[in-house]
Image (cartoon, rainbow, N blue to C red):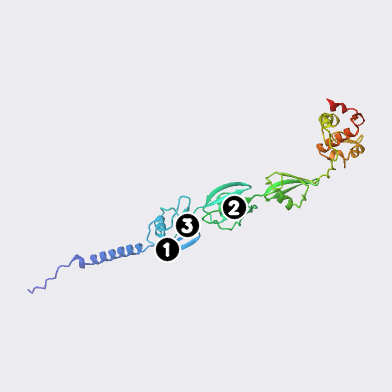
Amino acid sequence: MARGRRRAPRSFWGSGWAMAAYGAAAVALVGRIVVGMGADVALDVDGRTMALRSSADTVAEVLQEARVAVGADDYLHPDARAPISDGARIVVRHARPITLTVDGRTARHVVTAMSVGGALDELDIEHTGSRLSVSREGAVPLSGMAVTMLTPRRVHVIAGGRRLTTTTTSATVRGVLKEKRVRHGDGYRVTPPLGSFPRHGTVIKVEPPGPVAPPRTVPITAEVAALNWAGLAACESGGDPRAFNPSGPYYGLYQFSLPMWQAVGGTSTPNLWPAEEQTYRAQLLYQRVAGRWQGQWPHCGARLFS
């Protein structure tokens, strides 16, 4: 019987199973190489975006690679421990100080918003209709800035016998009067003062200048000045400089008649003048009549000596 050639035994490494194993290993190796090449990441730092190819596993590692520091007050999204995937976007907003004065009251804050309007929104401060010292669209620099805000306030103005109510963002009483075109020139009395801040509900009074007081050319002696003029005024008018009695008519603290008032240099009517002017004219009258008070103050003149 003829004998056939003996076949050599087949090795596993040359078998089909081996080829399949080689293929699987190659796929796994290629996968590792692809992953190791990294992911495309967009890094937005204070509004400036840079594109990175990173092999980092977390947001913190990307920031470290890009040499971007993030402090406790800064804004970071996503979280530093978040994993990185292809196409990830990382946003960093560094903190910046802002000194905000609202209606005269100043406070200091730290914000991460890059615009003035965004900073006010971040601080939850309503600013619609308010007047700002800078534009809402203006940038807040990393070094910080100061912002003054005047909110709309309702105030009342009394002038010329009229009362009006207005809404203002003015910083001063003077500004309110300018807005409403209310005259307040030299000699006018304005309360509160023109330079004061008009808070919500403030009542602004504007009074025109009174008449110019006539000169006081005659001095009052010490003896006359020492009499009880307050007692006389209390008896005649209840101490009211604006008192008016139509029966005479009689006016003011000492119930002058117009002829007697004019005789001692008074102008207009006595009750339009301050108490000091009325008292001077009453003392001058007393001196003019040489102390004979009975003709002018028959019922109350004796009070001068009490």
The residue under label 2 is 147
Per the image, label 3 sits on a secondary structure element best described as: strand
Distance Cα–Cα, label 2 vs label 1:
37 Å
The residue under label 1 is 52
Q: Amino acid at mark 2?
A: Val
The residue under label 3 is 91
**Residue closest to the eye, 2 or 36:** 36
Q: Residue furthest toward the bottom?
A: 2
Where in the figure is residue 254, as x and y percent of width and height? 86, 33
Location of residue 1 with respect to 197 vertically, above or below: below
Distance Cα–Cα, label 3 vs label 2:
26 Å
Q: Earlier in the sequence, mark 3 or mark 2?
A: 3
Distance Cα–Cα, label 1 vs label 3:
13 Å
Residue occupying image coordinates x 49% and y 61%: 48
Q: Amino acid at mark 3?
A: Val
Where in the figure is residue 285, as x and y percent of width and height? 88, 34
